[in-house]
């Protein structure tokens, strides 16, 4: 009865040498990791841009309303001074 050869004693195969299937599996795994890393980096960048755009929108709206409020206050102050001036003349 013939003995079953051990893996490292298989004829035609050197110890520690990767087969074609091993290389293909390693490349496929590396490709998957690369795709996942690239996708997550893209998502993080898109989220960063989205948050920055929201902050800029909020800042511009706040600036608009600050100007609008200042304008209303100034107009009311001018109107009050006009009325106070007219009433003091009477």
Image (cartoon, rainbow, N blue to C red):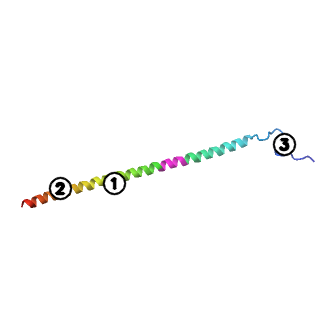
Question: In percent of the image, x 44 and y 51: which residue is there?
Answer: 51
Which residue is labeled 3 in the image?
A: 9
Which residue is labeled 1 in the image?
A: 62
The x and y percentages for residue 46 are 48, 48
Question: In percent of the image, x 40 and y 52: which residue is there?
Answer: 55
Crowdedness near tag 1: few (<14), some (14–19) or many (≥20) residues, C-alpha within 10 Å: few
Query: Left or right of 33: which side holds 44?
Result: left
The x and y percentages for residue 56 are 38, 50
Which residue is labeled 2 in the image?
A: 78
Query: Left or right of 5: which side holds 77?
Result: left
What are the residue bounds of the magenta stretch? 40-47
Q: Is residue 20 in the magenta section?
A: no
Question: Which numbered disc, 2 or 3, marks the residue that appears first in the sequence?
Answer: 3
The x and y percentages for residue 84 are 13, 60
Q: Quadrant of residue 73?
A: bottom left
Query: Left or right of 59: which side holds 38?
Result: right
Question: For the residues marked 3 and 1, what is the alpha-carbon distance in whole angstroms?
Answer: 76 Å
Query: Left or right of 20: which side holds 60?
Result: left
Question: In percent of the image, x 7 and y 59: which residue is there?
Answer: 89
Q: Is residue 46 in the magenta section?
A: yes
């Amino acid at each position: 009865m013939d003995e079953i050869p051990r893996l490292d004693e298989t004829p035609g195969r050197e110890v520690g040498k990767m087969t074609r299937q091993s290389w293909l599996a390693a490349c496929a795994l590396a490709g998957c990791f690369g795709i996942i890393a690239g996708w997550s980096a893209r998502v993080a960048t898109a989220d960063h841009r989205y948050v920055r755009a929201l902050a800029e929108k909020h800042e511009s709206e706040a600036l608009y309303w600050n100007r609008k409020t200042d304008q209303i206050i100034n107009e009311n102050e001018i109107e009050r001074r006009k009325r106070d001036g007219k009433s003091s003349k009477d």
